[in-house]
């Protein structure tokens, strides 16, 4: 029996989802520090919420199997 993770990996094996938009990151030390603090604060705030996932700096693909439809997350 294949695990749930294995089934998901198999389903999307033929689709490549880019993990970069090729644009340079223009963040300063202030921006990185602010992002880390906000990320930590939001994770703590929603720690008991099963239906909320806190993330930062990730690409979201809104259309299944379409790697061209993406946006970069912002908090």
Image (spheres, helix red, strand yellow):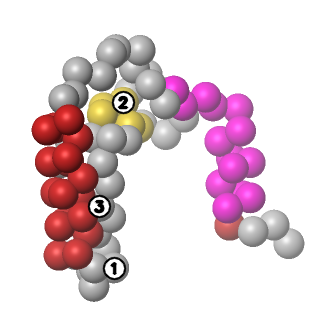
Is the residue under label 1 in contact with that under label 3 (CB below 8 Å)? no
Depth check: 41 or 33 in front? Answer: 33
Q: Please give the residue where the numbered disc 1 appears in the rendered image.
A: 50
Q: Which mark is residue 70?
A: 2
Q: Residues within 10 Å of mark 1 (few under 14, many from 20)?
A: few
Whole-number angstrom distance, CA of label 2 to CA of label 1: 25 Å
Q: Earlier in the sequence, mark 2 or mark 1?
A: 1
Is the residue under label 1 in contact with that under label 2 (CB below 8 Å)? no
Residue at image coords 39%, 20%:
21
Whole-number angstrom distance, CA of label 3 to CA of label 1: 11 Å
The answer to if 17 sits in the magenta stretch is yes
In the figure, is residue 75 to the left or right of 71? left
Q: Please give the residue where the numbered disc 3 appears in the rendered image.
A: 54
Residue 30, picture quadrant: top left
Q: Secondary structure at mark 1?
A: loop
Residue at image coords 24%, 53%:
36
Q: In the image, which is nearer the foreground, mark 2 or mark 3?
A: 3
Q: Position of residue 11 (x, y in %)?
A: 68, 47
Which contiguous range is marked in magenta?
A: 5-18
Q: Residues within 10 Å of mark 2 (few under 14, many from 20)?
A: some
Depth check: 62 or 75 in front? Answer: 75
């Amino acid at each position: 029996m294949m695990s749930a993770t294995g089934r998901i990996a198999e389903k999307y094996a033929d689709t490549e989802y880019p993990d970069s938009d090729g644009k340079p990151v223009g963040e300063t030390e202030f921006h990185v520090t602010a992002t880390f603090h906000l990320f930590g604060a939001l994770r703590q705030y929603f720690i008991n919420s099963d239906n909320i996932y806190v993330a930062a700096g990730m690409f979201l693909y809104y259309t299944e199997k379409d790697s061209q439809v993406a946006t970069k997350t912002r908090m």
